[in-house]
């Protein structure tokens, strides 16, 4: 099975500064990868390179032929000057027939807001609409750039639940930038910790014990995430190592 | 029966109203009002240029406005100053250079008619410019409509869905340039942006889709043109300002009206 996207040693250099340095990522079928990293770590740039929106200065990105990607941006500020309903937005530049559109609307559960203007929607509703739009062309890969950044806790929780359900029900892979790792701990299979280069990567349980992760995010974050994770794993080992890095 | 010059005025006004209403929606959506105004200011330089070297002022206006837009784009990318500051500098510099050129070259122009429009003296050749330019603008808008609207809602999303955002932005600038160039004789340099903004703003709360807003804005603009020409003939008022006043009145009436509807619905 060929990979959906394979990035080989890509580097992005701007004014002699490495935004990305020798980053290699392989995205395969049914992957659920979450990228974390501090501000300015090059996370969004990495997504751009992987989607083919930016040509890295070094290295190569190969995509599977005719790969269908659904993209969900960080946020959508609702522009009150344009009158457009959710339905109008979902139809815009999409060739779906009314039936398949309706199926996606039902799947995401936005039928109640379908005829509302975009400008009156809450942040959570907008993210659901964006998610619905990204699913319209039956993507093989969903790319999300901090999709729940502007939502409150309950909004985040329900958004990630929805995402998890979509991952289970549809045959797709997910690549996401997110700081809310504690929320996606149960579903994410691989975490990539990025700080211009890949600091560490692997299963969430491994990541939280990695010294480089702890030095980047601090012990509190590592501990917090481990706690969440233990709830899922029923792991009762509460001893943590690596305190000296804090 | 109406005099031919009035028929020409009506034909010119309707042509301008239709494209200005459509492009005006993008001006309102993308908050480009100041850009439109500045583009119009730079048009005077184009007019002076055209008169000086003896080519059509429409053509020279389009060239001058395009140059203005490209210089702005170039300066914007340098990220030295805020866009509205750059616009303020460029627009008034262009307007002033235009004025100086007209006076130094002793060009015989009716400055007033360029600044405030003089729709009642539109010639048949000018009608051709309006309708050919207008046809091109409408065609481009219709062909690129979904991409333009999506890009307006969310640029990153549009990029991810393979919209060539760079091209679409340039196209929008070119189309605005054409609209400004062909509108000058109707409402004049100083009032063009009102023909872009007022009908679109009036349409905003009457409709619930982008297409409907563009069509409604075009219709409202047409009503303003007809009303303005009528006003101008009956009361002997200047035509450009009469059109703008009519558009503003329409805005006031319909805005109050749509507010009442909104309140009743809640």
Image: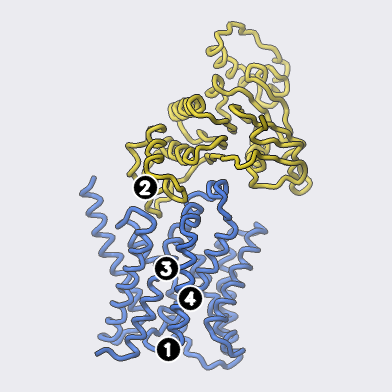
- Within 10 Å of the Cα at label 3, are there few (<14), some (14-19), or many (20+) other Cα atoms? many
Residue B57: x %, y % from top left: 53, 84
Q: Colour of chain B?
A: blue
| Disc 4 and disc 1 in contact, CB within 8 angstroms | no
Residue at position x 58%, y 55% in the image: B164
Residue B2: x %, y % from top left: 27, 89
Could you tell which of marks 4 and 3 lies nearer the N-terminus? 4
Q: Name the residue that disc number 3 marks.
A: B196
Q: Which mark is residue B133?
A: 4
Q: Which mark is residue A85?
A: 2
* C-alpha gap between disc 1 and disc 3: 23 Å
- Within 10 Å of the Cα at label 2, are there few (<14), some (14-19), or many (20+) other Cα atoms? many
Badge 4: chain ID: B
Discs 2 and 3 lie in a common subunit: no
Q: Secondary structure at mark 2?
A: loop
Side of A141 relative to A116 (left or right): right
Residue at position x 71%, y 25% in the image: A200
The foreground one among B105 and B32 is: B32
Which is closer to the viewer, label 4 or label 1?
A: 4
Q: Secondary structure at mark 1?
A: loop
Badge 2: chain ID: A
Side of B65 relative to B225 (left or right): right
Counting every numbered tag in the picture gives 4
Badge 1: chain ID: B
> Which lettered chain is shown in yellow?
A
* C-alpha gap between disc 2 and disc 3: 24 Å
């Amino acid at each position: 099975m060929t990979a959906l996207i394979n990035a080989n040693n890509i580097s992005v250099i701007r004014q002699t500064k490495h935004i990305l340095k020798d980053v290699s990522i392989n995205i395969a079928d049914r992957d659920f990868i979450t990228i974390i990293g501090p501000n300015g770590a090059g996370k969004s740039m990495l997504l751009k390179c992987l989607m083919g929106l930016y040509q890295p200065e070094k290295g190569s990105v190969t995509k599977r032929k005719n790969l269908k990607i659904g993209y969900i941006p960080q946020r959508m500020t609702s522009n009150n000057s344009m009158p457009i309903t959710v339905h109008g937005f979902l139809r815009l530049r999409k060739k779906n027939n009314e039936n398949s559109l309706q199926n996606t609307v039902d799947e995401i559960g936005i039928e109640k807001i379908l005829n509302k203007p975009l400008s009156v929607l809450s942040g959570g509703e907008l993210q659901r609409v964006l998610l619905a739009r990204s699913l319209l062309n039956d993507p093989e890969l969903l790319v999300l750039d901090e999709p729940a950044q502007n939502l409150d806790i309950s909004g985040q929780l329900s958004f990630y639940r929805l995402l998890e359900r979509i991952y289970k029900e549809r045959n797709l892979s997910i690549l996401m930038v997110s700081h809310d790792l504690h929320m996606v701990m149960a579903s994410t299979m691989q975490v990539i910790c990025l700080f211009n280069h890949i600091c560490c990567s692997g299963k969430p349980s491994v990541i939280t014990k990695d010294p480089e992760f702890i030095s980047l995010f601090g012990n509190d974050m590592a501990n917090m995430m481990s706690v969440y994770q233990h709830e899922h794993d029923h792991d009762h080992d509460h001893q943590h190592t690596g305190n000296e890095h804090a | 029966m109406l005099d031919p010059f009035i028929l020409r005025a009506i034909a010119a006004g309707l042509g301008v109203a239709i494209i200005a209403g459509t492009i005006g929606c993008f001006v309102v959506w993308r908050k480009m009002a100041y850009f439109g105004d500045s583009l119009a200011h730079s048009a005077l330089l184009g007019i002076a240029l055209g008169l000086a070297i003896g080519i059509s002022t429409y053509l020279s206006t389009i060239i001058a406005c395009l140059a203005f837009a490209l210089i702005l784009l170039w300066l914007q990318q340098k990220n030295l100053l805020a866009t509205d500051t750059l616009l303020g500098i460029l627009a008034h510099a262009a307007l002033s250079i235009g004025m100086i050129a007209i006076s130094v070259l002793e060009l015989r122009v009716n400055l007033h008619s360029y600044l405030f429009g003089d729709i009642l003296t539109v010639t048949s050749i000018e009608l051709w410019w309006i309708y050919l330019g207008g046809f091109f603008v409408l065609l481009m808008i219709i062909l690129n409509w979904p991409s333009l609207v999506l890009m307006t809602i969310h640029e990153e999303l549009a990029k991810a869905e393979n919209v060539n955002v760079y091209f679409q932005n340039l196209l929008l600038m070119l189309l605005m340039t054409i609209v400004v160039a062909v509108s000058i004789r109707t409402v004049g340099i100083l009032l063009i942006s009102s023909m872009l903004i007022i009908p679109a703003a009036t349409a905003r709360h009457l409709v619930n889709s982008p297409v409907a807003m563009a069509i409604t804005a075009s219709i409202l603009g047409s009503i303003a043109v007809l009303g303005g020409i009528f006003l101008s003939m009956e009361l002997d008022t200047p035509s450009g300002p009469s059109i703008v006043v009519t558009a503003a009145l329409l805005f006031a009436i319909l805005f109050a009206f749509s507010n009442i509807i909104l309140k009743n619905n809640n």
